Image: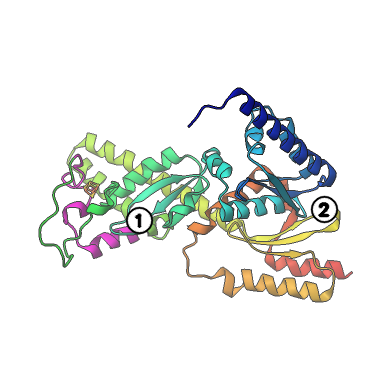
Amino acid sequence: MPALTAPKRKADAARLAERLAHLRDVVRASATDRPGVYRMIGDGGEVVYVGKSKRLRTRLLSYFRAEFPKDKGARIVREAATIEWSYVPSEFAALLEELRLIKRLRPRFNVAMKRDARHYAFVRVAGGVAPRLTVVRGSGAGERGGVFYGPFVGAERVGDALRELGDALGLRDCTFDSRMRFSDQPDLLVLPPRTPGCIRHEIGTCLGPCVAAVRAEVYDDRVRQARAFLEGRDDEPMERLREAMQLASDEMAYERAAVLRDKLQRLEALHEQFARLRFAVESLSFAYIVPGYEGEDRFYLVRRGVVRAELPSPRTPDEWEGLRLECGRIFGTEGARTPRAVSTVPAHEVDELLLVSSWFSVRPAELQATVSADAVGTLWAQDDR
Ligand code: SF4
């Protein structure tokens, strides 16, 4: 690429300064200080960044005071040919809208910043042949597909416990997905070569799908056991360890008994942590009443940490009846008793669950603005008086 000459650099800098001054004038003239979501759009129409603020005008103007290249805001606004925004009733609404836009548009600056949101983690049971259990971190985890359990903090500790669970059930933890073969696979003419560098099958902690040492149904059954353990329906893996520990102790193999005791403790901690988690996710089910800008109050119907419906605050008997019906749909037999296990999170709900749980965990006072679905009728009666 030819080097920029000094006059060309000067001309480019002048054009950029002019464009930024124009964008700033547009914001000054038309943006209002109220909750909203904005999109920075590049030359070719690509949305390069989506953001939100409870004071939109102030937030947008701050981009023009940011220092280049030190501040991220300055780097973003220099890519923008236009800025578009829309207003929403509240900060909570802005957060939700921002998340949904990011998921739909995948702006490159937002995607690059996802690394900031790696605080939370999930246990993922992957799909495919011989699934494995892994700990995946942070926002965007759901894009990888599979079944998720979480969210939780302390990924390292959970990862250690998950390894014990995998060892106890003989599940693989390697990434050699393409090498997996079951012993009852019809197209298995020659045994696949031993996977180098892994002795888990030899020492009995993996059933060995890499060397066709296990039938598909046996492996799948172990995966089902792992899921039942994470869902609190089965503690067989802990029983196995208890029995092995007792046997080692009876044989006076005290060192081995101590190792097994430590493994058991890690599994017990995992079991308890997931029991607490199930309770936490289930407790994020309610109607959340959010006062909005200039009376645009909203009812959010949240079930298992995900907003299932958003309605304007009802004012007439018909609107109250609409809300009651919506509560019935979401929290009643149809919505609440899906066959899904209580601690799993579908991949597409992971990010919203993270958003809602962190919203309430940093603002516990907001829980006072929530009511159970059953209590919505009481509000109606109060409104009627
Ligand atoms: S024994 Fe084979 S399948 Fe099991 S973890 Fe090792 S490489 Fe993977």
Q: Is mark 1 within 8 Å of ligand 1?
A: no
Q: Report x, y in % for residue 294.
A: 86, 54
**Residue 242 seen:** no
The answer to whether residue 82 is seen in the rendering is yes
Residue on which the image places disc 1: 226
| Disc nearest the viewer among 2 and 1 | 2
Mark 2 surroundings within 10 Å by alpha-carbon count, few (fewer than 14), some (14 through 19), many (20 or more): some
Q: Residue at x 80, y 55 (%)?
A: 292
What residue would you read off at disc 2? 293
- Between residue 228 and residue 43, name the one nearer to us: 43
Q: Helix, strand, or loop for circle 2?
A: helix
**Residue type, numbered disc 2:** Tyr
Confirm whether the magenta stretch covers residue 79.
Answer: no
Q: Position of residue 264 (x, y in %)?
A: 34, 44
Instruction: Describe residue 154's horizontal placement relative to residue 381 as left or right.
Output: left
Residue that appears at 20% across and 62% down: 215
User: In the displayed image of the protein, which residue is found farthest to the right?
Assistant: 385
Which quadrant of the view contains residue 286?
bottom right
- The location of residue 297, given as percent across then percent down, is 80, 59
Q: Amino acid at mark 1?
A: Ala
Q: Is residue 150 left or right of residue 22?
A: left
Say which quadrant the C terminus sits in: bottom right
**Residue at image coords 69%, 68%:** 374
In whole angstroms, how far apart are the C-alphas of marks 2 and 1?
47 Å
Q: Secondary structure at mark 1?
A: helix
Task: Please report the bounds of the magenta region as a residue range.
Answer: 197-226
| Residue 69, picture quadrant | top right
Is 97 in front, or is 268? Answer: 97
Q: Residue furthest left?
A: 190
Q: Nearer the viewer, residue 12 or 363?
A: 12
